């Protein structure tokens, strides 16, 4: 089989050379061309039709975000973003993932050999995942056409009156009134150990390894809607329901779809684990918060858990639910990685197992590998009310949901666009 063709886009000749050398170490890839800015990248994609693109964020003439949007509109292609770790870079990286980038890697911090080797290994694995994925993430979420897919519910019919009513309520503009304030967290224990960088994820080829082709593109209008008004938090921290969502590759876009569609009066806290390095999770939480009627925060050690708040696990830490005499709180740990990840979806799910007094609702979204399968199985066996897996038809990478479904842990399979309505109907019924 001919190697997959890669277009490298970076304004630094040094970085172009570094990434070319790293990529060419794997016979699965060849370098079809290089470009020095976004404008050149758009023309190169049109001319060479690469199988995958590596795209720097900060470049002259046209930056990576602008180029990405033009590429996705004109010649949809899997794109791996190359990001620094500044606040602006992490924020723009999250935007890029929503705009259609397949994934991202952190650029080497310098010329240190070990750092370059580690980044190179991560890049190769992400390139493999991108070209072997069943479908690329090409369309900004708000522009997605309706997905025509049959949902599978093992125990009961999917479409119920409650679900239909919930879906109709999502469109109502009067979800909330005021952005809430959160009770100050309890004093955190010492956590002086510096988090490790997440290990490179191993690419697993799906059942058929064909080169991805683009679905039809709908022109995107880059006028973002203002955030819905926030529902004011109750002073009480008591709740009967809790939602836990796990995601990996393709997760930021999927989380945007789900979280932005949940109502401000959901009445349950939402815990989220997204496989992502430190610093990027803060930008993810801020981005989700700007589109949600719920209050979205990066979780901090000791945060009191409120209904109506989404807690995103910080990169480099496992997120667990804890309980003391004052109620439920967030517990972060630096225990070893699970399934190659910290935070791990398994760890989050497992932490909910003892709390049988709560009606627990678990969701597993797009992602590679099997993180979440064991924890979800334990959660279901302990009496969880809901276990939802994203349908293959809408997954960017159908790995984690497939593993959980095949284990018997997933009881309901839904396309991405129907998951929020199901969560709402389960929590509010």
Image: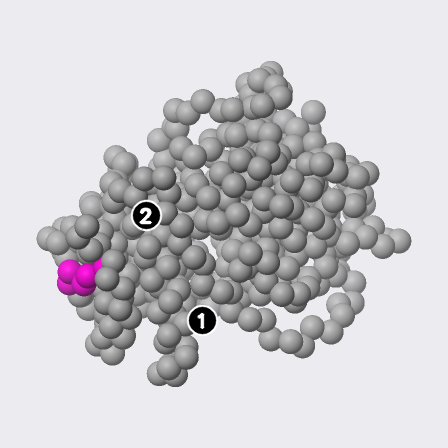
Q: Relative to 404, is 247 above or below? A: below
- Most common secondary structure along the magenta stretch: strand
Q: Position of residue 323 (x, y in %)?
A: 81, 52
Q: Badge 2 is on which residue? A: 132
Percent position of residue 17, x then y: 23, 75
Foreground residue among 123 and 273: 123
- Label 2 sits on a secondary structure element that is helix
Q: Report the number of discs.
A: 2
Residue 42 showing in the rendered view? no
Residue that appears at 50% across and 44% down: 400
Q: Is residue 192 left or right of residue 34?
A: right
Residue 72 percent coordinates (x, y): 26, 47
| Location of mark 1 (residue) | 86
Residue 1's label in the rendered image is: none
Residue range in magenta is: 29-33
**Does residue 163 belong to the magenta stretch?**
no
**Residue most extreme to the left:** 47
Note whether residue 353 is visible.
yes
């Amino acid at each position: 089989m001919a190697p997959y063709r890669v277009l490298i886009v970076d304004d630094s000749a040094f970085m172009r050379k570094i990434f070319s050398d790293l990529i060419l170490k794997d016979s699965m890839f060849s370098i079809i061309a290089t470009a020095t800015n976004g404008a050149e990248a758009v023309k190169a994609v049109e001319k060479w039709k690469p199988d995958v693109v590596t795209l720097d964020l900060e470049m002259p003439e046209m930056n990576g975000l602008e180029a990405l949007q033009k590429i996705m509109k004109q010649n949809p292609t899997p794109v791996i973003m190359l990001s620094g770790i500044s606040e602006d870079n992490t924020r723009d990286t999250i935007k890029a993932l929503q705009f259609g980038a397949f994934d991202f890697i952190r650029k080497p911090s310098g010329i240190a050999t070990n750092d370059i080797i580690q980044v190179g290994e991560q890049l190769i694995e992400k390139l493999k995942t991108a070209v072997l994925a069943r479908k690329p993430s090409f369309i900004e979420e708000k522009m997605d056409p309706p997905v025509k897919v049959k949902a599978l519910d093992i125990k009961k019919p999917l479409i119920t009156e409650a679900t239909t009513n919930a879906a109709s309520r999502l469109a109502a503009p009067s979800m909330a009134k005021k952005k809430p304030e959160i009770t100050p967290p309890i004093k955190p224990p010492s956590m002086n150990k510096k988090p490790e960088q997440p290990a490179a994820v191993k690419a697993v080829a799906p059942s058929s390894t064909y080169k991805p082709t683009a679905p039809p593109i709908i022109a995107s209008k880059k006028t973002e809607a203002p955030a819905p008004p926030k529902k004011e938090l109750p002073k009480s921290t008591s709740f009967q329901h809790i939602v836990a969502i796990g995601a990996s590759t393709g997760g930021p876009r999927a989380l945007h779809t789900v979280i932005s569609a949940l109502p401000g009066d959901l009445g349950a806290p939402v815990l989220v684990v997204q496989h992502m390095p430190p610093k990027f999770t803060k930008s993810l939480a801020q981005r989700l918060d700007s589109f949600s009627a719920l209050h979205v925060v990066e979780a901090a050690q000791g945060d009191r858990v409120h209904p109506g708040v989404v807690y995103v696990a910080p990169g480099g830490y496992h997120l667990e639910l804890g309980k003391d005499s004052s109620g439920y709180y967030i517990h972060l740990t630096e225990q070893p990685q699970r399934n190659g990840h910290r935070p791990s979806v398994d760890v989050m799910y497992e932490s909910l197992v003892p709390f049988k007094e709560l009606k627990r609702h678990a969701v597993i979204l797009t992602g590679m590998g099997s993180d979440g399968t064991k924890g979800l199985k334990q959660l279901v066996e302990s009496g969880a009310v809901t276990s939802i897996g994203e349908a293959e038809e809408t997954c960017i990478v159908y790995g984690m949901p497939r593993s959980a479904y095949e284990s018997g842990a997933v009881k309901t399979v839904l396309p991405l666009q129907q998951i929020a309505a199901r969560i709402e109907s389960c929590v509010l019924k």
